Image: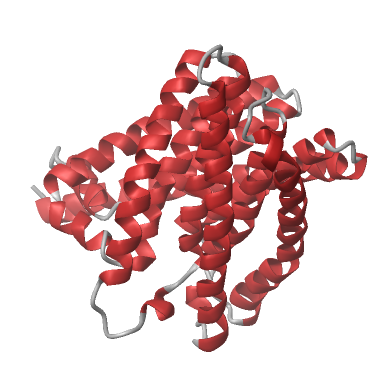
């Protein structure tokens, strides 16, 4: 058997890597945060370690992809259904920063915040124009899907981390508060804009069952992270910007929680319509991480919103949702590992066939 089986297959995997694969880090990181909120410290630490390893591997794979397959990366940047997947690196970095902040690692959290904010600033102005300006036979509206909400999630991830860091620093509190409020506000406007695009696509252009992937759950995830950002902002140290915005942000957070809750039944029905009604096979897919992330974020958001506003029912809902998120993560991670094993076996088998009997 030729020894280059795995390296050859690894090169192909790098070339075909989906830009949205940082969604795995987002999902694992937020479930780690949720487990920490439940005082499941061992589970939280294990999940954090998995998220950290996955983040490092994906960074290396994306750098290798950029160096070796620039034309493929350039194509991804001009395909709206893949372009917005690059925002997952922003959100993943922000989630990891929020997780290290829970361990009191302020210096590391500040570094994560700087990287998250920098990536958001660059990609936020770069990616949408590239996606919207590409020439195609179909309109951009026909290409709108759930991944577009990653623009909102990336923006709110900056708000979440800035608000988490702000009370713990001695200098720059006013600036961090402004950054958190700015990103929360921009995220709200982006949510409305993206929701209009995606809703128009759903109602005007008929969706095929194969197109209705788990990515549409990001619409709920975007509401949930908006709630978490709002709750973190409510917990910030006093700053001038809060005196004129805090009540609005608190009210907006409740509204987004309510809308995110309302979205759950339609999303569940969409899964039924796809997998039961039209018999699309239920097998591991990258979009499954887009389901785990909203579940975890919704659980964390419900708990924080219930605690900040003294609403026990929301706290209870958060507890239940975190259990659901952990189970969903375990099932998705098992599917990922099984897919990884099959990929390795397939790579070795193909190389053995080419090598022949000798």
Q: Position of residue 237 (x, y in %)?
A: 67, 22
Image side of residue 106 versus residue 87, left or right: right
Q: Position of residue 192 (x, y in %)?
A: 58, 65
Q: Position of residue 15 (x, y in %)?
A: 22, 52
At 75% from the left and 67% from the top, the residue drawn is 265
Image quadrant containing the N terminus: top left
Image coloring type: secondary structure
At 58% from the left and 78% from the top, the residue drawn is 279
As drawn, which residue projects farthest toward the left? 358
Q: Nearer the viewer, residue 26 or 307?
A: 307
Image side of residue 354 versus residue 328, left or right: left
Q: Nearer the viewer, residue 239 or 47?
A: 239
| Residue 328 visible here | no
Residue 104 sits above or below residue 337 on the image: above
Q: Nearer the viewer, residue 293 or 308?
A: 308
Q: Nearer the viewer, residue 99 or 40?
A: 99
Residue 276 sits above or below residue 356 on the image: below
Residue 74 sits above or below residue 96 on the image: below
At 61% from the left and 31% from the top, the residue drawn is 32
**Quarter-of-image position of residue 156:** top right
Residue 93 sits above or below residue 79 on the image: above
**Quarter-of-image position of residue 6:** top left
Q: Position of residue 80 (x, y in %)?
A: 35, 67
| Residue 107 visible here | yes
């Amino acid at each position: 058997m030729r020894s280059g089986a795995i390296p050859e297959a690894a090169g192909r995997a790098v070339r075909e890597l989906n830009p949205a694969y940082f969604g795995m880090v987002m999902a694992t990181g937020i479930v780690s945060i949720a487990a920490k909120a439940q005082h499941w410290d061992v589970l939280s630490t294990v999940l954090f370690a998995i998220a950290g390893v996955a983040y490092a591997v994906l960074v290396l794979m994306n750098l290798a992809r950029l160096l070796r397959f620039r034309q493929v990366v350039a194509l991804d940047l001009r395909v709206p259904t893949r372009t917005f997947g690059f925002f997952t690196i922003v959100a993943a970095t922000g989630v990891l920063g929020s997780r290290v902040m829970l361990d009191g690692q302020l210096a590391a959290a500040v570094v994560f915040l700087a990287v998250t904010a920098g990536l958001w600033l660059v990609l936020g102005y770069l990616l949408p124009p590239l996606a919207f300006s590409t020439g195609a036979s179909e309109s951009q509206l026909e290409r709108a899907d759930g991944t577009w909400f990653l623009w909102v999630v990336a923006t709110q991830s900056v708000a979440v981390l800035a608000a988490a860091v702000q009370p713990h620093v001695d200098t720059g509190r006013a600036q961090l508060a402004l950054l958190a409020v700015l990103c929360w506000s921009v995220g709200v406007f982006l949510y409305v804009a993206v929701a209009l695009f995606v809703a128009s696509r759903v109602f005007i252009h008929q969706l095929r069952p194969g197109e209705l992937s788990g990515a549409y759950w990001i619409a709920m995830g975007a509401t949930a992270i908006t709630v978490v950002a709002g709750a973190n902002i409510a917990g910030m140290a006093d700053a001038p910007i809060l005196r004129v915005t805090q009540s609005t942000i608190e009210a907006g957070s409740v509204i987004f929680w309510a809308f995110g809750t309302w979205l759950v039944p339609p999303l569940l029905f969409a899964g039924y319509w796809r997998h039961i009604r039209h018999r699309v096979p239920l097998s591991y897919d990258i979009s499954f991480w887009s389901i785990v992330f909203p579940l975890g974020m919704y659980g964390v958001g419900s708990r924080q919103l219930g605690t900040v506003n003294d609403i026990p029912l929301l706290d209870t809902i958060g507890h239940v949702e975190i259990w659901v998120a952990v189970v969903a993560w375990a099932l998705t991670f098992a599917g990922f590992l099984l897919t990884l094993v099959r990929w390795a076996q397939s790579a070795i088998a193909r190389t053995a066939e080419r090598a022949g009997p000798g």
